[in-house]
Image (cartoon, grey):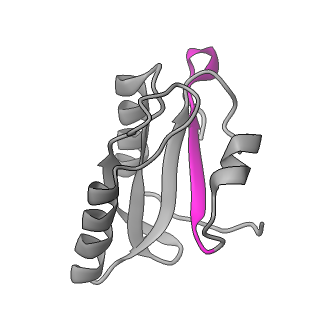
Amino acid sequence: MTDVTMTIPKEIYEALIVHAQGLAPIESCGYLSGQPGQIEVFTPMTNSDNSPEHFTFDPKEQFSALKQARNEGRQLVAVYHSHPASPARLSQEDIRLFNDPNMVYIIVSLMNGRPDI
């Protein structure tokens, strides 16, 4: 993996945290779209697994998010998900399941009651 600089507007940053807190203890998830290095839109998704330890996008929502981003001249640039009770770093399961080397993966941790991205 390589380091990537990504600009996230404050309102999207805050929306990621609110989404994670609202679904805890279930992992929240979604896409961030825009241009490379610049987030413009947060698209929350349904965690079909409804699990506190992993997530799966609803396939219909996933296709819809991709289609909408393309129609609006944006790219899907990042996958977001939360870790309700663990640090903001990729777990072994995350690494095993992620299959797009061009995607940036952003994790919001709610561990210790203080959001960390």
The residue located at (67%, 68%) in the rendering is: 4
Which residue is found at the position 63% from the left and 67% from the top? 5
Q: Nearer the viewer, residue 30 or 4?
A: 30
Asked if residue 56 is among those painted magenta in the image, a careful observer would answer: no
**Residue 65 percent coordinates (x, y):** 29, 64
Relative to 96, 17 lies left or right = left
Residue stretch in magenta? 102-114
Question: Can the viewer see residue 60?
Answer: yes
Q: Quadrant of residue 35?
A: bottom left
Q: On the rendered structure, is 6 left or right of 67? A: right
In the rendered image of this protein, does residue 8 appear above or below residue 76?
above
Q: Position of residue 43 (x, y in %)?
A: 31, 54
Q: Residue at x 30, y 66 (%)?
A: 63
Q: Nearer the viewer, residue 95 or 59?
A: 59
How far across and down, in percent of the image, does residue 36 sit?
51, 78
* Residue 39, horizontal then vertical, whole percent: 43, 65
Task: Indicate the quadrant containing the N terminus: top left, top right, bottom left or bottom right.
Answer: bottom right
Q: Nearer the viewer, residue 59 or 7?
A: 59
Displayed quadrant of residue 115: top right
Quarter of the image that includes the C terminus: top right
Q: How many marks?
A: 0
Q: Is residue 50 left or right of residue 53?
A: left
* Residue at (50% x, 40% y) in the render: 55
Residue 31 sits above or below residue 56 on the image:
below
Instruction: Verify whether residue 109 appears in magenta.
Output: yes
